[in-house]
Image (cartoon, rainbow, N blue to C red):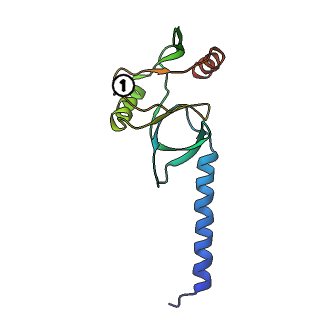
Amino acid sequence: MLCNPELNSMKITILMIMVSGSVLMAQNGPLANGVYAVEEGKANGKNLVVRQYEGKEVVLDTANFAPLAVQGKPQIERGPRGSGLMIQLAPEAGKRLEDLTRSHMNRPIAVVIGDKILSAPRVRSVITDGKARVTPCEDEACETLLRQLSK
C-alpha cells in the first residue's frame, strides 16, 4: 500500500481542526453549577476548560468536580465580615466535595455558578459535612445566587 503524503497531511489538518473545535466547544459550552478542580501550570487533558476569573485565565477540570446539588434551601448569612451563602449539599454531592477537597489540599478549587467562577479559594481543610459557604457575597449577588440555586 502506497502512502500519499498529501492525503496524510490533509487528514492531520482535518484532525487538528476537529480537536480545536472540540476544545472551543467545551470552553464555550456552559458549565454546570459546582466546585471544580483548578489545574495549575501546564495542564493537558481532554476534560479541561478555561474560564476568566479576576482578569486571569483559570483552567478547570470538568472530570474532577462536585455538583452544587442543594438539599434544602440555601441561606444568606450576614456577619461583621460580610455576607455569605450557606449551602447544604445532597449526600452524593457532599461526598464528591469531600473527595475533591481531600485530593486538592493546599491547592485551588473554583466555585462555578451560572457558568462563571464566583470564587477560587485554596483548600485549607477537607469538607466532610457537605456544607459549603460561598463568600464574599454582596447582598444583591447573594440574592441572585439564591434564586439560581433554588431553581
Using the image, determine if residue 65 lies above or below residue 151. Answer: below
Position of residue 87 relative to residue 31, above or below, is above
Give the camera-side residue of 34 and 150.
Answer: 34
Please name whichever residue, 68 or 118, is drawn nearer the observer in this view of the structure.
118
Q: Position of residue 65 (x, y in %)?
A: 45, 37
Residue picked out by circle 1? 127
Density class for disc 1 (Cα within 10 Å; few <14, some 14-19, many ≥20) is some
Quarter the C terminus occupies: top right
Q: Quadrant of residue 19?
A: bottom right
39 vs 118, left or right, is: left
Q: Vertical placement of 88 versus 96: above or below?
A: above
Amino acid type for the residue under numbered disc 1: Ile
Q: Quadrant of residue 124?
A: top left
**What is the residue that sits farthest to the front in this orientation?**
81
Q: Return the x and y of residue 88 as percentages of the image width and height.
A: 45, 18
**Number of numbered discs visible in the structure rendering:** 1
Residue drawn at the location 63% of the way across and 15% of the way down: 143
Kindly give the residue lying farthest to the bottom in the view shown: 2
For residue 83, side relative to residue 94 (left or right) = right
Residue at screen point 60% across, 60% down: 20
Image position of 110 (left or right of 16)? left
Q: Residue 141 in the image: state x and y as whole percent.
A: 63, 20
Helix, strand or loop for disc 1: loop
Q: Position of residue 25 (x, y in %)?
A: 62, 50
